[in-house]
Image (cartoon, coloured by chain):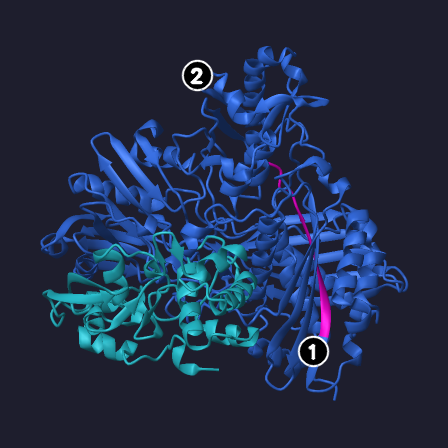
Chain colours: A cyan, B blue
């Protein structure tokens, strides 16, 4: 098993470090009710305010936008750039619904700061279809009914792509291990197992988009 | 009246086929826009301030600092001074702002003074809940006291618990909403496209006709997304207060898991009495449950074995300062199946009897003995009961393996629904229905039913759903959607086809009732060469399209749909006696479901229900903290769901037979979600050698049961 292309809970941007860097009253991640009491005891001082223009390289294209230091890559994709394939579900690096590929590795976009993503090669699910051409994973997910409500599906497709980019012929066991960082609520795992294996065969057959 | 009945099984070309889901590509390519993905121009973001206290009275709310923040467009107090709050997470105030980060800052600038009141948030120990338990009265059938005292009766006793779990929809509750002038545009994540406008309108005091609801996709509901809720009302009010700009208000994950709905817990002390041959003669239970402040109703126990001759039931509802219950896929049935099936398997163990034999021995006490008998046999065959079942008293070693049984029943007849179908002169066809696709494939099956009726390929039919301007259809709950929308589509498409026959008949010199639509042609019955293509037939319409409606009437379904589904699940697990870890090996579902419109989608839904049962049986529980009154695991790190490697191999057997098919369509959303926890809990007990009485079957609970009861070598 290749550890390096799995979404990692402990990235260079740990939750603790992230919150420290952002300021005492927390940022986009400080959404829980547990923070509200503490919030009331504090003023807004210590929060880094102000916006910075940045350029992100997404699916080979430059995107210019303006962000706050505390904005996650996920929120900037969804709110600033209208790239909404990556979903916000747990918002703290657990469920994988926001998985994108950065510099060839699957990452949770909710645990990456947008400003830190500058200069890096970012792939989102939107980049896997151009015109009528689709990455074989997309059709394999449909062929194997690897989706129900579909809200986790984009994250699974991107985590699967990150795996196949490095491990073109995974065994079913490897699929299970590599996709352990993504969660589905409707229960589509049976289809996903088959879809990834089917896509890997398609890719080897030269059908690659 | 036209003949609406389903075509014979052997004649079907589209119904019964595993057509791929209609919205698969948009979903898998990320192009599907869920309500939470919508970014209309001038969008504002809204965030709730919620109560950190489980029970408190609001003394004051100061929103002045928030109102004065740059970028804030509206602040509303929801729970003003004097309001008594009954659970942590209750909405106190809400802010709309240009950006979500500004709204979050503004929420933190709101000052609330609370008078904190005493709370109770845990119910598993009934002796500690004080006056929070409300007895629901006693039910007695037969003479349980006399039966328990009969000579030779063996009595098995146990106390069992299944905890509160949440829906944990991946798309949280919420909506984008815009209240401009007298019109509201409403994009909710909902299970109730046709009815939610009325619900919201009532809260906003405007007519439902002024609320336009649209929803193409939604990210999971499982019973929790019917009403417009406070987020709907407050979102609309914020929009109005912000000059009619659209507002996005979705719950963050912590709030979602705290207030957006739970499945009630269930705890029960159960005694079952049987003769030495395993015939059950008496049942006695004292149960209690909580689904939040409103308490919790009794699960229907003894479950499925409802014809037991003697029983006594006592139940108490426990009111807690915790988020309220909502319908959760088969309300109260998984709990009832768990309590009943574990009590029966413990009785079997006490009698040193194979539990499968005990279930069969008492099958006449069930509602559908013949069906359950054949399903038990089928499930036993698939899972290899004879080879793989090990009784508790024979278990030894450090890795132990065995099987367990769970049982289910459900209604599932179709809800009231109207569909409208259109045949155009150019041959194009359309089905419209104000229903919703929760991810189960509703879009797809509507197209299948219409295509079958018109003798067209599936791809020829355009389907429109997810809009309350379309003909009204019921909420998606209780497995009622498939029967409702398919029957309505069948009737409306038959009605439209009759009109087409009338237009075509003169040119073929036959009466309209001599025509049939098959393989893309309209032709004379018994004379396949006499006819014309669908397109040529539609040209006879001149310039006027045909539009016909059809409705499913639940009081008179014409046999198109019905209720009453049975199911059996069996689990095969291994348990590591040193670590307490449970591993799923295999999990089998045998399910009857009447006429199956799309076996691929049906199978997916059953897989999903089984996987949800793996979650609930092995890892899932809401943990309340009595000190703070809060949910300790309102996140997805510690509110656990099973992952892709945790579920073993799943096998679905659909009981597709002419006999079942004749019953018409039966919904499949709930039935397979019922028996899984029971099956897994029984397999674990049989493997470990002793009952693990508390779900989820985490290492902690497994090891505690082993420590308490000891183990064989």
Q: Which residues are magenta?
A: B402-414
Left or right for B416, reference B250 = right
Residue B36 % position (x, y): 33, 51
Q: Is residue B673 magenta?
A: no
Residue ID for mark 2: B544
Residue B179 % position (x, y): 24, 37
> Where A101 sits versus B259, above or below?
below
Where the C terminus of chain B falls, by quadrant? Answer: bottom right
Determine the image quadrant of residue B112.
Answer: bottom left
Where the N terminus of chain B falls, by quadrant? Answer: top right
Which is more toward the observer, B694 or B183? B183
Residue B148 % position (x, y): 82, 59
Q: Residue at x 40, y 57 (%)?
A: A134
Query: Mainly helix, strand or loop, the magenta region?
Result: strand
Kindly check if marks 1 and 2 are in contact, taking CB atoms under 8 A apart as contact: no
Left or right for B602, reference B227 = right
> Where B74 sits versus B637, above or below?
above
Residue ID for mark 1: B688
Q: Chain ID for label 1?
A: B
Task: Please tell me how crowded label 1 is: few (under 14), some (14-19), or many (20+) other residues with Cα within 10 Å.
Answer: many
Which is more toward the observer, B545 or B299? B545
Q: Residue at x 62, y 21 (%)?
A: B531
Q: Secondary structure at mark 1?
A: helix
Q: Residue at x 55, y 26 (%)?
A: B534
Instruction: Report if residue B130 is visible in the image.
Output: yes
Sequence-wise, the earlier of marks 1 and 2 is 2
The label nearer to you, 1 versus 2, is: 2
Count the labels in the image: 2
Task: Please tell me how crowded label 2 is: few (under 14), some (14-19), or many (20+) other residues with Cα within 10 Å.
Answer: few
> Where B531 sits versus B57, above or below?
above
């Amino acid at each position: 098993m290749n550890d390096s292309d799995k979404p990692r809970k402990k990235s260079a941007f740990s939750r603790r470090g992230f919150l420290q860097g952002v300021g005492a009253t927390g940022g986009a991640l400080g959404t829980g009710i547990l923070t509200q009491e503490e919030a009331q005891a504090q003023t807004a001082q210590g929060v880094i305010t102000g916006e910075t223009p940045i350029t992100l390289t997404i699916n080979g294209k430059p995107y210019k936008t303006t962000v706050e230091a505390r904005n996650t890559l996920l929120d900037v994709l969804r709110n600033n750039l209208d790239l909404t394939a990556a979903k916000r579900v747990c918002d703290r690096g657990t469920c994988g619904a926001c998985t994108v590929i950065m510099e060839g590795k699957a990452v949770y976009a909710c645990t990456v700061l947008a400003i830190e993503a500058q200069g890096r090669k970012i792939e989102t699910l939107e980049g896997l279809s151009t015109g009528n051409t689709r990455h074989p994973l997309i059709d394999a997910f449909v062929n194997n009914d690897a989706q129900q409500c579909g809200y986790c599906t984009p994250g699974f497709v991107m985590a699967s792509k990150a795996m196949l980019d490095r491990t073109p012929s995974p065994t079913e066991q490897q699929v299970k291990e590599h996709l352990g960082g993504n969660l589905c609520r409707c229960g589509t795992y049976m289809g996903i197992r088959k879809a990834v294996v089917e896509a890997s065969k398609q890719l080897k057959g030269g059908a690659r988009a | 009246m036209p003949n609406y009945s389903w075509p014979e099984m052997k004649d079907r070309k589209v119904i019964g086929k595993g057509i791929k889901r209609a919205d698969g590509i948009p979903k898998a390519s990320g192009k599907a826009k869920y309500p939470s993905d919508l970014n209309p121009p001038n969008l504002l973001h809204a965030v709730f301030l919620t109560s950190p206290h489980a029970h408190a009275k609001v003394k004051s709310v100061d929103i002045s600092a928030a109102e004065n923040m740059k970028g804030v467009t509206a602040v509303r107090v929801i729970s003003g001074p004097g309001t008594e709050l009954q659970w942590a997470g209750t909405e106190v105030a809400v802010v709309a702002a240009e950006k979500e980060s500004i709204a979050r800052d503004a929420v933190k600038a709101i000052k609330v003074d609370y008078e904190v009141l005493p709370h109770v948030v845990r119910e598993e120990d009934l002796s500690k809940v004080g006056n929070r338990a409300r007895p629901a009265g006693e039910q007695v059938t037969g003479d349980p006291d006399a039966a328990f005292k009969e000579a030779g009766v063996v009595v098995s006793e146990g106390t069992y618990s299944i905890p509160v779990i949440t829906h944990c929809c991946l798309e949280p509750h919420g909506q984008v909403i815009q209240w401009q002038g007298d019109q509201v545009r409403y994009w909710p994540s909902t299970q109730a496209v046709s009815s939610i406008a009325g619900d919201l309108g009532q809260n906003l005091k405007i007519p439902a006709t002024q609320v336009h609801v649209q929803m193409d996709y939604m990210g999971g509901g499982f019973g929790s997304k019917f009403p417009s809720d406070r987020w709907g009302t407050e979102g609309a009010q914020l929009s109005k207060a912000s000059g009619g700009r659209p507002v996005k208000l979705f719950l963050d994950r912590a709030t979602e898991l705290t207030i957006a709905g739970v499945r009630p817990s269930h705890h029960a002390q159960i005694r079952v009495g049987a003769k030495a041959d395993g015939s059950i003669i008496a049942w006695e239970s004292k149960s209690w449950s909580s689904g939040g402040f409103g308490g919790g109703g009794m699960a229907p126990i003894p479950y499925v074995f409802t014809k037991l001759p003697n029983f006594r039931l006592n139940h108490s509802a426990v009111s807690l300062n915790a988020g309220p219950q909502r319908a959760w896929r088969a309300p109260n049935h998984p709990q009832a199946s768990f309590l009943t099936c574990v009590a029966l398997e413990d009785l079997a163990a006490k009698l040193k009897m194979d539990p499968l034999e005990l279930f069969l021995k008492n099958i006449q006490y069930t509602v559908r003995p013949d069906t359950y008998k054949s399903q038990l046999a089928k499930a036993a065959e698939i899972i290899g009961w004879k080879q793989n079942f090990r009784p508790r008293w024979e278990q030894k070693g450090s890795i132990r393996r065995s099987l367990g049984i769970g049982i289910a029943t459900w209604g599932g007849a179709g809800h009231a629904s109207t569909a409208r179908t259109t045949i155009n002169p150019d041959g194009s066809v359309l089905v419209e229905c104000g229903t919703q696709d929760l991810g189960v494939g509703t879009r797809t099956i509507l197209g299948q039913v219409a295509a079958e009726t018109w003798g067209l390929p599936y791809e020829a039919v355009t389907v429109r759903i997810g809009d309350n301007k379309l003909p009204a259809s019921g909420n998606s709950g209780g497995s009622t959607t498939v029967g409702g929308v398919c029957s309505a589509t069948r009737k409306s498409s038959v009605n439209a086809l009759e009109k087409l026959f009338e237009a075509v008949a003169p040119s073929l010199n036959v009466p309209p009732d001599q025509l049939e639509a098959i393989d893309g042609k309209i032709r004379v019955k018994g004379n396949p060469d006499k006819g014309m293509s669908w397109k040529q037939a539609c040209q006879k319409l001149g310039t006027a399209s045909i539009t016909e409606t059809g409705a499913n009437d639940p009081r008179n379904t014409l046999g198109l749909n019905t209720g009453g589904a049975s199911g059996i699940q069996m689990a095969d697990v291994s348990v590591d006696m040193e670590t307490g870890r449970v591993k799923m090996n295999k999990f089998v579902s045998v399910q009857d479901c009447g006429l199956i419109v799309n076996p691929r989608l049906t199978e997916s839904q059953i897989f999903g229900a089984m996987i949800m049962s793996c979650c609930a049986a092995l890892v899932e529980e809401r943990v309340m903290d009595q000190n703070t009154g809060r949910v300790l695991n309102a996140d997805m790190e510690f509110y656990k769901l099973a992952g892709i490697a945790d579920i073993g191999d799943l096998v679905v057997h659909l009981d597709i037979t002419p006999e079942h098919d004749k019953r018409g369509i039966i919904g499949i959303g709930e039935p397979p979600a019922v028996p899984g926890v029971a099956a897994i809990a029984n397999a674990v007990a049989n493997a470990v050698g002793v009952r693990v009485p508390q779900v989820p079957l985490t290492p902690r609970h497994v090891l505690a049961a082993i420590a308490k009861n000891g183990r064989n070598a």
